Each structure stands twice: as structure tokens, then as C-alpha cells.
Amino acid sequence: MPSVVGLLEQHELAARRRVDGLREEADRIQAELAAAELEWQEWAIARRRVDAVLAPDDGNIADEEAVPGPRDADARPAPRQAAKAKSQVPVWREGLAWSVLSVDYQRILTALADRHRLHQGPLTCQELAVRFGLGAVPAKVEALRSKAKRLVARGWLAERQPGQFTLAQGVAGQGGAS
């Protein structure tokens, strides 16, 4: 028959393991909570920005046209800056043509479509920069990376391994013909 002290040590060890397991789970949940809060804050900021862009002017003095004075008689008021045509990347959906994207985004899709057709696998942004004749200059590579990440976020591209881009599944089937 085991001793009382031995039984107490076994129960203490089991309790310690349970406490350690619960602490690990609490740490994981805490990290997940922090990430979710950060994501929520980013969406809240994005929502406020969209609301600000889409809100009517409500007589905002900064946006009103000034009455031309004697010095400004020949000057025309500057038109309000609108978003450039095709500067936005829409979320990909079946049947959406590549022509809705700007030329830079279309070039990325075309290069990756060529790789897909030849079964050559993904491309890095550095390889894209060289392919486009931009050289492996960090600023150019990062600009391409930003565009590629935006295409991934909108469903046009896939990034199965960090920094390696391919066409997304449905986009790959289209081959740019849509």
C-alpha cells in the first residue's frame, strides 16, 4: 500500500500539470484576444475613414470654392481630387474581368498567369521586379510586394508560402480571358 505522502505527491503533481496546462491555454487565449482587438481596431479605423470619405460635405469651409478676387480673376478653382480610375482593387469574384484593375496589377496577374500555364510555380516580388525590368531595387520590390499583398487580400492571388505569389484558384482557371 502506497504511503499517504506518496499519494499526496501524486495528487500535487497532477494538480500542477493541470495548472500549467490551463496557464498555457490562458496565454494562448490572451494572445488571440490581443490579435482580435488589434484587428477590430483596424476595422474601426477603416470604417471611420470610409464614413469620412462617403459623408456629405455639410458645408465644410475648407472644401468650399473661394469667391475670386481681383488677383484670382484668371485663375480657375481646382477641381476636387477624385480617386483615379481603376486605382482600387475590387474583391475578386467569378466573371470579374482583369480590366477592372490598373495596368500595374494586370502586369502582375499576366506574369503569374504565364507561370501558371507553363507549370513553373510561384514568383517572388524580386523576380517580378527583374521580369518587369525594374531591377532588384528595394523600393521597386517593396512597391510590387504591396501590390501583390493587396491582390492576395482581395482574392486575386494566393500566397501559400511567405513571399511567393501565384494566381488564386478561380483566377487561375480564367487565364485573363474574362
Image (spheres, rainbow, N blue to C red):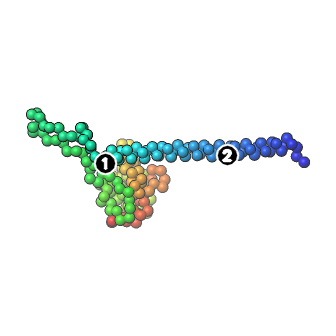
**Kind of residue at badge 2:** Gly
Q: Check disc 2: other Cα within 10 Å, few if <14, some if 14-19, many if 20+.
A: few
Q: Residue at x 79, y 45 (%)?
A: 11
Q: Residue at x 27, y 49 (%)?
A: 83
Q: Nearer the viewer, residue 59 or 128?
A: 59
- Cα gap from disc 2 to disc 1, whole angstroms: 49 Å
Report x, y in % for residue 49: 36, 44
Read off the residue under disc 2.
21
**Kind of residue at badge 1:** Leu
Report x, y in % for residue 112: 39, 58
Q: Residue at x 30, y 59 (%)?
A: 99
Going from N to C along the chain, the mark reached first, 2 or 1, is 2
Q: SS of the residue at dot 2?
A: helix
**Is 82 on the left or on the right of 130, as rendered?**
left
> To which quarter of the image does residue 8 belong?
top right
Q: Nearer the viewer, residue 103 or 136?
A: 103
Q: Nearer the viewer, residue 74 or 166?
A: 74
Mark 2 touches mark 1? (CB < 8 Å): no
**Is 129 on the left or on the right of 13, as rendered?**
left
The furthest residue to the top = 71
Q: Residue at x 60, y 43 (%)?
A: 27
Q: Quadrant of the C terminus?
A: bottom left
Task: Name above or below for residue 111 compared with residue 56.
Answer: below
Residue 140 seen in the figure:
no
The furthest residue to the right = 1
Report x, y in % for residue 23: 65, 43
Read off the residue under disc 1.
54
